[in-house]
C-alpha cells in the first residue's frame, strides 16, 4: 500500500448540465487537492480517497454565470466554501473500480459511486512515480439542496437537475513511500 497526492496541475475536475433542455453547459473547478492510497499488489485498487474542492473556483467561461453559480441560488460559496469527497471503499468490476464514498456539497452529504479506471503508472523525467485514473459519476443537484430554476416559455426548465461529473487524476507517490522521489512540474 502506498500514499499518492493528486497533482492538480495535471488533473481535471469537470462537469456538464443540461441548459434549456436542448444543450449542455460544461464547466470545471480550477482549485482542488487530495490524496489516496493504492494497493499496487491488488491491481492498483484505490482506497482512503480524500478530495477537497474550492467551490469558488468554479469556471464555465462566462463570468456572469460563474458569479450566479457562486451565489446563494446555487453553491453559496460564502456559506459553503468547500466541496469534498471521501471514498471509503473500492470494488473491482472487470478492468474498472467502483469507488464508494460520501460527497459533501452545499452543506449536504450523500453517498456517491465513482466509476473509475486505472490509466497507468510510470516514472516522470525527475524520477518521481506517477499514477493516473479516470472517473465519472452523475448526481441529482436537487438532492444536495440546489433547487434554483426557471421555467421556460416553450416548456421545460432552464437548468437540468442531473449533473455529469468527469475526473482525470494524475497523482505523485508521496515522499516517504517506497520508490518516491522529488518531482517538478512540466
Image (tube, rainbow, N blue to C red):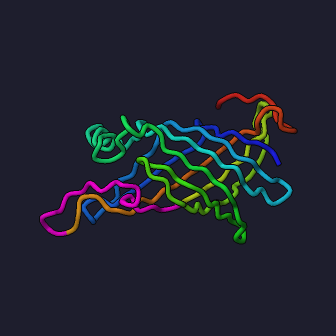
In magenta segment, residue 23: no
Specify start and end residues of the magenta stretch as a single range.
137-155
Residue positioned 55% across, 59% down in the render: 136
Which quadrant: the C terminus? Answer: top right
Going by the picture, which residue comes out furthest to the left?
A: 153
Q: Give coordinates of residue 75: x percent, y percent.
A: 36, 45
State which quadrant residue 156 falls in: bottom left
Q: Is residue 154 above or below residue 131?
A: below
State which quadrant residue 64 falls in: top left
Residue positioned 72% across, 54% down in the render: 46
Q: Is residue 175 left or right of residue 140?
A: right
Q: How many marks?
A: 0
Q: Give coordinates of residue 82: x percent, y percent.
A: 47, 39
Q: Is residue 182 left or right of residue 144?
A: right
State which quadrant residue 139 falls in: bottom left
Q: Give coordinates of residue 22: x percent, y percent.
A: 27, 65
Residue positioned 23% across, 63% down in the render: 157
In magenta segment, residue 149: yes
Q: Is residue 161 left or right of residue 98?
A: left
Q: Nearer the viewer, residue 136 or 48?
A: 48
Going by the picture, which residue comes out furthest to the bottom?
A: 94
Residue positioned 72% across, 67% down in the render: 92
Amino acid at each position: 500500500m502506498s500514499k499518492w497526492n493528486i497533482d492538480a496541475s495535471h488533473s481535471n475536475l469537470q462537469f456538464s448540465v443540461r441548459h434549456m433542455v436542448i444543450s449542455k453547459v460544461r464547466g470545471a473547478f480550477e482549485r482542488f487537492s487530495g490524496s489516496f492510497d493504492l494497493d499496487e499488489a491488488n491491481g492498483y485498487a484505490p482506497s482512503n480517497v480524500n478530495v477537497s474542492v474550492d467551490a469558488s473556483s468554479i469556471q464555465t467561461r462566462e463570468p456572469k454565470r460563474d458569479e450566479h453559480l457562486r451565489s446563494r441560488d446555487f453553491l453559496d460559496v460564502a456559506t459553503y466554501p468547500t466541496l469534498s469527497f471521501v471514498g471509503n471503499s473500492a470494488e473491482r468490476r472487470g478492468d474498472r473500480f467502483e469507488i464508494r464514498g460520501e460527497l459533501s456539497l452545499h452543506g449536504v452529504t450523500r453517498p456517491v459511486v465513482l466509476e473509475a479506471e486505472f490509466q497507468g503508472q510510470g516514472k516522470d523525467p525527475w524520477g518521481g512515480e506517477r499514477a493516473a485514473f479516470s472517473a465519472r459519476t452523475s448526481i441529482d443537484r436537487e438532492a444536495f439542496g440546489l433547487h434554483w430554476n426557471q421555467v421556460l416559455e416553450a416548456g421545460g426548465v432552464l437548468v437540468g437537475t442531473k449533473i455529469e461529473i468527469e475526473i482525470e487524476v494524475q497523482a505523485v507517490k508521496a515522499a516517504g513511500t517506497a520508490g518516491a522521489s522529488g518531482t517538478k512540474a512540466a
